[in-house]
Image (cartoon, helix red, strand yellow):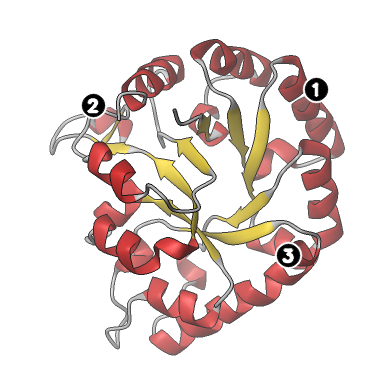
Amino acid sequence: MTDFSYQLYSSRNFPTLADTLAMLAAAGYKGVEGYGALYADDAKVAELTAGLAAHHLRMPTAHFGLDMLENEPEKVLGIAKALGIETIYCPFLPPDQRPTDGAGWLAFGARLQAASEPYRAAGLGFGWHNHDFEFVPAADGVIPLEAIFEGGPDLEWEADIAWIIRGGADPMEWIQTHGRRITAVHVKDIAPEGENADEDGWADVGAGTVDWKAIMTALENRQVKAFVMEHDNPKDHARFAARSIANAKEF
């Protein structure tokens, strides 16, 4: 049976961290995934380290912003060591920084490849986490994620399946073509059209339109190390966490 992790960004609007970690452990999660605000300073790192230990949770994967990854590698490595992080994913590129053509996205992939070097040298995995914009053709018709992977031949991929779909692409095709890169998956669901507007159109896993049984079957026998539950804007994070893991155990 798959052990599911949980992206703590899903609970950012529901303090406290200690309460969130207790809730997740009680719901049956074995791991969590971190994001930048949780390790913004030494005190937060210490709080997170203690909380993980208290609730017997691991943090095998984590998100770090590109600026920190490029400019503060020693700090990132220290945080990774303290928290037991094994694989780092760069999660986002703001709209005003996004290239407009294939050459630009190729160069961005090369930039990620260069940024990965100190982390890979330290024995950590390093990859990219997608949203929807990477599947929207650039002005010259190039698919950004294809160019990113071409420019970054050693990049791993944390595949956010629901964002692939929202980007207008077929996740099954991407799994088939680039599955060798996938080392983590964001397990997220999309509400039926017109529903859950107050949750940005997302749904609890197993309660939406994504065919997760088929997705999980397609991911069998690949090198996926983490299946990470995420909801970008839940009204009730405890509901989302408990309902999603219960449904996902049936996949």
CA gap, disc 1 and disc 2: 34 Å
1 or 2: tag closer to the N-terminus: 1
In this orientation, which residue lies closer to the viewer: 218 or 143?
218
Residue that carries the numbered disc 2 in the rendered image:
207
Residue that carries the numbered disc 3 in the rendered image:
120
Q: Residue 119: give x, y in percent of width and height.
A: 75, 62
Please name the amino acid that badge 3 sits on: Arg
Q: Residue at x 79, y 28 (%)?
A: 49
Q: Assign the N terminus to one quadrant of the image.
A: top left
Judge left or right: residue 207 versus residue 222.
left
Q: Residue 118: give x, y in percent of width and height.
A: 79, 67
**Callouts 1 and 2 close, C-beta under 8 Å:** no
CA gap, disc 3 and disc 2: 37 Å
1 or 3: tag closer to the N-terminus: 1
Q: Residue 127: give x, y in percent of width and height.
A: 57, 61
Residue that carries the numbered disc 1 in the rendered image:
50
Q: Assign the C terminus to one quadrant of the image.
A: top left
Q: Please, is residue 240 above or below residue 134 in the view?
A: above
Q: Nearer the viewer, mark 3 or mark 2?
A: 3
| Residue furthest front in the image | 221
Judge left or right: residue 123 versus residue 42.
left
